[in-house]
Amino acid sequence: MNKEYIALLGKLSKDNRKTIKKMQHYLETCYLNEVVFEDMMCDLAGMALECQERGESFDDSIGTNYKDFCRSLAKNAKKQTFPERFFDVLKWMLYFDGIIIPLLYVCYAIFGFTEPHIEGVTITAFAGQLLMYFSVSTFLIVGWFLVKRFTYYSPTLVLSIYMAAVILVFLLTDFIGDYFFASLTVSVNLIIWAIVIAAFLLICYLARRLIAISNVYSRKK
């Protein structure tokens, strides 16, 4: 979120801030264009601040159901294109997958494991183990984006299916790793890993932002 939105949130009362946050989380499930979404949240926060300064209730001004109000706003708003959503999902995958190697490095350094092991800034781990970690992390991210689409309608069922699927992926990849890659190890330099992940994250951010801006501009044009 941009600085304007953060500044507006800081001026809101606790109740209004809570309402705005609920609206933000709900609108995130509508997959709006990033630029449109940021402008919309700034407008909503500004509306809440105006109501607050007039001594009026923001909840009353948007109606009894904030979800209905958000749906009416999102109905005709510019949505994310496939490339925007792709780079958004890829960004979170890189975040989660990117911390696996540093976490393993810390664990091996603290607990003093001999195999896999660390030498300087290089970590050596079993390929099957890494396959399991990366597969589960990737599934967590992709699955969560799918869950966000449905949790407002049947949260218990959807979350149950999601958690069951995560456990299944864990068991499956753990079996595949032990069966096919039991003795194979992989060495990764921590510094090179961090540089590569940071570079890909920057590419994802710039690509997603440029695509979002160009989509909004093309509509206005």
Image: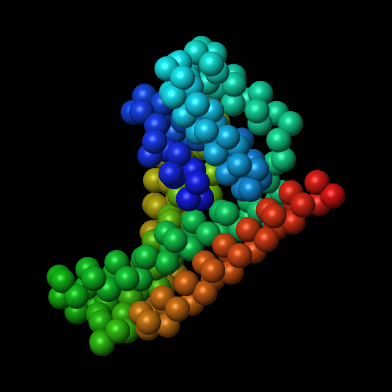
Q: Is residue 162 above or below residue 152?
A: below
> Is residue 178 visible to us here?
no
Where in the figure is residue 85, as x and y percent of width and height? 63, 51
Left or right of 37 in this view: 194: left
Q: Is residue 187 above or below residue 165?
A: below
Left or right of 119 in this view: 98: right
Q: State the residue at coordinates (19%, 75%).
A: 109
Q: Is residue 44 above or below residue 128?
A: above
Left or right of 73 in this view: 118: left
Q: State the residue at coordinates (52%, 67%).
A: 201
The colour mode here is rainbow
Q: Nearer the viewer, residue 35 or 193?
A: 35
Where in the figure is residue 207, as x and y percent of width and height? 64, 63
Residue positioned most to the left: 111
Residue positioned most to the right: 221
> Is residue 181 visible to us here?
yes
Q: Nearer the viewer, residue 176 or 145?
A: 145
Where in the figure is residue 50, as x and y percent of width and height? 50, 26
Q: How many numbered discs, if any? A: 0
Where in the figure is residue 131, as x and y percent of width and height? 43, 65
